Image (tube, rainbow, N blue to C red):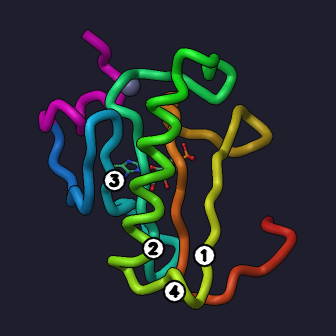
Amino acid sequence: MEECLFCRIIRQEIGSEVVAENANAIAIRDINPQAPVHILVIPREHIASLKEITADKCDVITDMVMLINELTVSEGIVQTGFRIVINQGEDGGQEVDHLHFHLLGGRFMRWPPG
Ligand code: 5GP
Ligand code: ZN
């Protein structure tokens, strides 16, 4: 059994605020939000990083994107805009080795990110 943080959250061994879910993915509020809307979209399956994505994972990626589409409407940011981020590896600032999209919105997003 995977001991990673997000696997434990998915198994409900660690509490989180689940805001949406479907067959292959769940969405939870980030514990340390960087914007008024900061949601993590996480595949139920343990996928360590983007590097592990192959053609047979297209259902997982589709479900992650479907959740983002639902959330931008339910969180009221579909018109104002939002940012989707994957932090990958050391230089990308990845802290949790279980693939996830950050969905950020509710404020203006500067560019380039820090
Ligand atoms: P990463 O840097 O790996 O892309 O992002 C990991 C994210 O997970 C961070 O934004 C961090 O605030 C969030 N996080 C870390 N631990 C927890 C937790 O226990 N619960 C929730 N909801 N988010 C967490
Ligand atoms: Zn995991």
Question: Mark 4 = which residue?
Answer: 106
Q: Dot 3, how many residues are within 10 Å of its Cα: few (below 14), some (14-19), or many (20+)?
A: many
Where residue 54 sits, quadrant-wise, is: top right
Looking at marks 1 and 3 on the same chain, the residue that comes earlier in the sequence is marked by 3
Q: Dot 1, how many residues are within 10 Å of its Cα: few (below 14), some (14-19), or many (20+)?
A: some
Q: Is mark 1 within 8 Å of ligand 1?
A: no
As shown in the figure, which amino acid type bears the numbered disc 2? Thr
Assign a secondary structure to mark 2.
helix
Assign a secondary structure to mark 1.
strand
In magenta stretch: residue 62? no
**Disc 2, disc 1: CB below 8 Å?**
yes
Q: CA distance from mark 2 to mark 4?
A: 10 Å
Q: Is residue 82 above or below residue 15?
A: below
Q: Locate residue 2, reporting x and y percent.
A: 31, 15
Where residue 92 sits, quadrant-wise, is: top right
Question: Mark 3 = which residue?
Answer: 27
**Disc 3, disc 4: CB below 8 Å?**
no
Looking at marks 2 and 4 on the same chain, the residue that comes earlier in the sequence is marked by 2
The image's mark for residue 82 is: 1
Q: Is residue 82 above or below residue 69?
A: below
Q: Is residue 86 above or below residue 54?
A: below
What residue span does the magenta drawing correspond to?
1-13
Q: Locate residue 55, reporting x and y percent.
A: 62, 18
Looking at marks 4 and 1 on the same chain, the residue that comes earlier in the sequence is marked by 1
As shown in the figure, which amino acid type bears the numbered disc 1? Phe
Q: Dot 2, how many residues are within 10 Å of its Cα: few (below 14), some (14-19), or many (20+)?
A: some
